[in-house]
Image: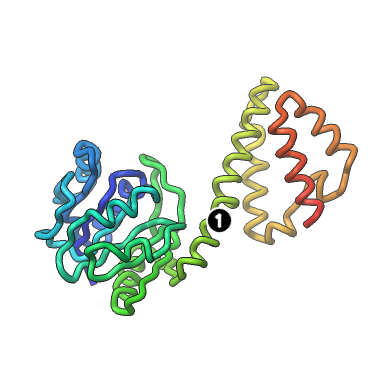
């Protein structure tokens, strides 16, 4: 089943999603952004979509309208957008509930949440991206499943309250992990050392964690309860009180778990 789709938003998600949907055989009819130049940047990545800064889609040929915007913009856009009869409005947020779309002019609403970190310009295989879908209408849910499965075999039906749990877990697994790597990079640079020497360790740690489970893969002074080394590291980090506190809290949590 192929769909006609309009995308509201011109950020990182839209940048990746628009060409992926077209490659899957769907037609992108419009790209909306308040800044028309930003909408044009996305339309350049697809065949025949129209860039627009007008939220009146009453004459659109699209059946599915995807809100690919930051969470804080979803309520306002959902309320303001004018949609044709029979349309489906979905958002791509990991945290915003389905009910957030309840006052829109859409006939049906749903969720199409890609569980991935998107960066403009960074090549990404959408076939490896899990999609979490939701709708209170069974026919709409089946359509969203077919849409998601045209992009990836990894499709899950997840309710809003559980999707929030997934998003929180994803922040720990992705955003916090990345931040820890950034801290490590800063420490190395502060010592005048090449961060490259840590990369094999980082790759092995992530690989081992996914293969045998994070609990089994845990190593280091905290899991060994090596308090002498922990104190030595804590003293080393005294140049930055916030980093010293992060080290202390995370180490204690490893010990306690």
The picture places residue 136, in percent across and down from the top left corner, at 36, 75
The type of colouring in the image is: rainbow
Residue at (31, 46) in percent of width and height: 15
Q: Is residue 131 above or below residue 36?
A: below
Name the residue furthest top.
Answer: 192
Q: Nearer the viewer, residue 102 or 34?
A: 102
Q: Residues within 10 Å of mark 1 (few under 14, many from 20)?
A: some
Tell me the quadrant of the picture where the C terminus can be found.
Answer: bottom right
Q: Nearer the viewer, residue 9 or 122?
A: 9
Quarter of the figure with residue 20: bottom left
Quarter of the figure with residue 244: top right
Q: Nearer the viewer, residue 145 or 34?
A: 34
Residue at (18, 58) in percent of width and height: 82
Residue at numbered disc 1? 168
The picture places residue 6, in percent across and down from the top left corner, at 21, 56
The picture places residue 65, in percent across and down from the top left corner, at 24, 60
Q: Is residue 187 above or below residue 227?
A: above
Q: Is residue 43 above or below residue 198?
A: below
């Amino acid at each position: 089943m192929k769909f006609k789709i309009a995308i509201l938003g011109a950020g990182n998600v839209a940048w990746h999603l628009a060409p992926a949907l077209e490659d899957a055989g769907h037609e992108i009819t419009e790209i909306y952004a308040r800044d028309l130049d930003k909408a044009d940047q996305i339309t350049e990545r697809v065949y025949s979509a129209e860039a627009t800064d007008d939220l009146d889609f009453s004459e659109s040929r699209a059946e599915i309208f995807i809100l690919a915007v930051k969470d804080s913009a979803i309520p306002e856009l959902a309320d303001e957008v004018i949609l044709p009869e029979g349309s489906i409005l979905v958002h791509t947020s990991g945290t915003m509930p389905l009910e957030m779309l309840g006052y829109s002019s859409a006939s049906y609403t749903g969720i199409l949440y890609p569980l991935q970190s998107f960066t403009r310009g960074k090549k990404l295989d959408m076939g490896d991206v899990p999609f979490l879908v939701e709708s209170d209408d069974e026919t709409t849910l089946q359509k969203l499943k077919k849409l998601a499965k045209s992009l990836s075999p990894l499709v899950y039906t997840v309710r809003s309250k559980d999707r929030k749990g997934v998003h929180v877990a994803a922040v720990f697994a992705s955003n916090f992990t990345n931040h820890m790597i950034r801290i490590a990079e800063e420490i190395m640079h502060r010592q005048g050392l090449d961060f490259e020497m840590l990369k094999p360790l980082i790759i092995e740690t992530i690989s081992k964690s996914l293969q045998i489970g994070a609990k089994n893969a845990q190593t280091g002074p905290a899991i060994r309860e090596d308090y002498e080394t922990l104190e030595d590291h804590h003293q080393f980090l005294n140049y930055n009180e916030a980093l010293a506190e992060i080290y202390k809290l995370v180490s204690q949590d490893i010990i306690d778990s």
